[in-house]
Amino acid sequence: MAIVDRVKAICLKPKEEWDVIAGETTSTADLLKNYALPLAAIGAVASFIGASFIGVSVPFIGTIRAPVVSGLVAAAAHLALMLVAVYLLGMIIDALAPQFGAQKNKDQALKIAVYSFTPGWVAGVLRILPSLGILSLIAMGYGIYVMHLGLQQLMKPPKEKAATYTVVVVLCGVGLMIVLGLVVGAITAPAMLAAPGLR
């Protein structure tokens, strides 16, 4: 299925699309390279353009822009963070399955992780205007709903445990993003400090 069709379907009619996804056989490499990478790149590129070329207006100071080198380093780190995060989240979904009476299945778990990020990745284009970046959080909230449907349809937990399964996965995902964010921050900090000051 073409990436644009999948994005539209998972965002507009997720319940029906999860039924289609459940029957697909997609390799991990293909899912990450041909779906996750291009979509995660939307937010990374938009953030780079927004931070380094458009900038943020600060009262009494003017417009602050990140140095281009720092912006590129941050964009590359953001992209790597997203790919690692969805892969690890897929592993977490699979590992937690027995605790909630769901079926263990690494392939299905990775599909849930990757496709649930779709609304947030698409909304990443809003980061081109730094002041609108916060709106992507709304899309991420919708992604939780998409994930909930996916967990029900692909991992098949008992109905009474599906909501709890979703909440635990989301909490693990938030913790994962915080830890990965700290690691990426530690890696990119030297490049940021070495770059010329903000202008």
Image: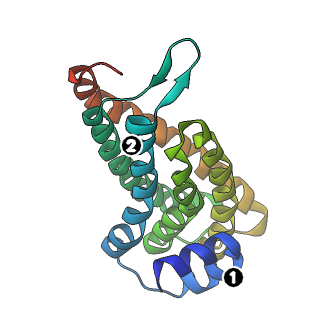
Give the structural element (helix, strand or loop) at label 2: helix
How many neighbours does mark 2 have within 10 angstroms: few (below 14), some (14-19), or many (20 or more)?
A: many
Q: Residue at x 39, y 30 (%)?
A: 182
Residue situated in front as seen by the camera: 44 or 198: 198
**Percent position of residue 87, x then y:** 40, 58
Q: Nearer the viewer, mark 2 or mark 1?
A: 2
* Residue 53, quarter of picture: top left
Q: Earlier in the sequence, mark 2 or mark 1?
A: 1
Q: Could you tell me which secondary element the residue under label 1 belongs to? A: helix
Residue furthest out toward the top = 60
Q: Nearer the viewer, residue 108 or 47?
A: 47
Q: Position of residue 183 (x, y in %)?
A: 33, 33
User: Residue at 69% of width from left, 82% of height from top?
Assistant: 16
On the image, the x and y values in percent for residue 158 come to 72, 69
What residue is shown with label 2?
Answer: 48
Where is mark 1, residue-wise?
Answer: 16
